[in-house]
Structure formats: C-alpha cells, structure tokens
Image (tube, rainbow, N blue to C red):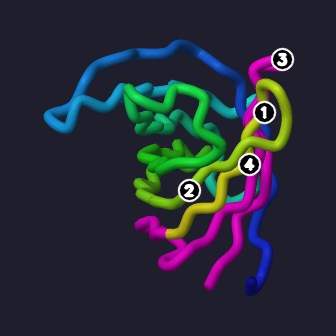
C-alpha cells in the first residue's frame, strides 16, 4: 500500500435487497460517516455485496462501493471502488477494494464491517 490519506468510521443507515440477472442476491448497504472525514467531509455511500443463491454461507465474495463526500467548502467528491470481502467472524467481514475518486485519484481501501455494531471502519490509501 501507499500513503494513508484518511481513516473512516461509518454507520449503517439501511439495506436494500434485489436479485440480478445471474440469480444472485444483491445486498446494498447504505452508510454515512459518523463524523466528517479529514479528506472528504461528510460521506454518504453504498456498499453492494453479491451472494450466490446456492451458497448463502460463503466465506468470501464480491463487493463494490459508490459514494460521495460533501466538503465543508461546498464542493463534492465522487468515488467508486471494487473488490472482495471475506468472513472474519460470525457476523463480520473484511473488505479490500480499489478504485478512484474525483479528488484523490487512484485509491485502495482496507476495512471491516460488523453486523454486531453496524459499523464500517477502515483506512483509505492513495496508490
């Protein structure tokens, strides 16, 4: 990894469920930052998890991120990332994603989300 640009802690807002054309469960987890991030300000985002119908207890899978940050000066940042998740406990997963945003460019995020606490937290790195 390269330079760490920020740490984050986001809280659960809601979930949305649907089925895609491959018959997978699409789980969209909507989150918002618990406090303003140093680099992005207030952040609202959606994590999208894909799960196969035949293996609901899988230990890993695909995840993506789409979100936007609202800076105190009135400007905005839009970001997209894709990657993988893996189980690290009964109801917790670690996520590793990479992508880019309109402010910092190429990024990598390493994080964890827990059903017990409804918190998603981790770090963002500039590549």
Instruction: Indicate the secondary structure of the residue bearing disc 3.
Output: loop
Please tell me the numbered disc located at residue 127: none
| Residue 46 vertical position relative to residue 126 in the rendered view, above or below | above
Along the viewing direction, whichever of 39 and 52 lies nearer the viewer: 52
Residue at position x 60%, y 48% in the image: 60
Question: Looking at the image, which is closer to me, 91 or 108?
Answer: 91
Q: Earlier in the sequence, mark 3 or mark 1?
A: 1
Question: Who is closer to the viewer here, 10 or 72?
Answer: 10
Q: Which mark is residue 92?
A: 1
Percent coordinates x, y for residue 16 in the rendering: 40, 16
Label 4 to label 1: alpha-carbon separation: 7 Å
Q: Secondary structure at mark 1?
A: strand
Q: CA distance from mark 3 to mark 2?
A: 20 Å
Q: How many marks?
A: 4
Residue under numbered circle 4: 94
Residue 126 vertical position relative to residue 98 in the rendered view, above or below = below
Upstream in sequence: badge 2 or badge 4: 2
Q: Which residues are magenta?
A: 99-127
Quick check: marks 3 and 1 in contact, CB under 8 Å?
A: yes
- As measured in the structure, the alpha-carbon distance from the residue carrying label 3 to the one carrying label 1 is 8 Å
In which quadrant will I find the C terminus? bottom right
Q: Is residue 123 magenta?
A: yes
Q: Secondary structure at mark 4?
A: strand
Can you tell which mark lies on residue 84?
Answer: 2
* Labelled pair 4, 1 in contact (Cβ < 8 Å): yes
According to the image, label 3 marks what residue?
116
- Residue 75, how many percent across, how many down? 46, 52
Within the magenta stretch, is there residue 46?
no
Q: From the image, which quarter does the N terminus lie in?
A: bottom right
């Amino acid at each position: 990894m390269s330079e760490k640009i920020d740490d984050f802690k986001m809280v659960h807002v809601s979930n949305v469920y649907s089925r895609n054309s491959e018959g997978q469960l699409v789980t969209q987890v909507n989150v918002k930052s618990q406090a303003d991030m140093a680099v992005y300000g207030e952040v609202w985002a959606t994590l999208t998890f894909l799960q196969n119908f035949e293996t609901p207890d899988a230990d890993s899978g695909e995840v993506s991120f789409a979100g936007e940050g609202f800076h105190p000066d009135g400007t905005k940042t839009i970001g997209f990332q894709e990657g993988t998740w893996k189980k690290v406990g009964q109801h917790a997963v670690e996520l590793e994603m990479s992508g880019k945003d309109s402010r910092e460019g190429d990024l990598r995020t390493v994080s964890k989300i827990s059903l017990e606490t409804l918190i998603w937290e981790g770090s963002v790195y500039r590549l």
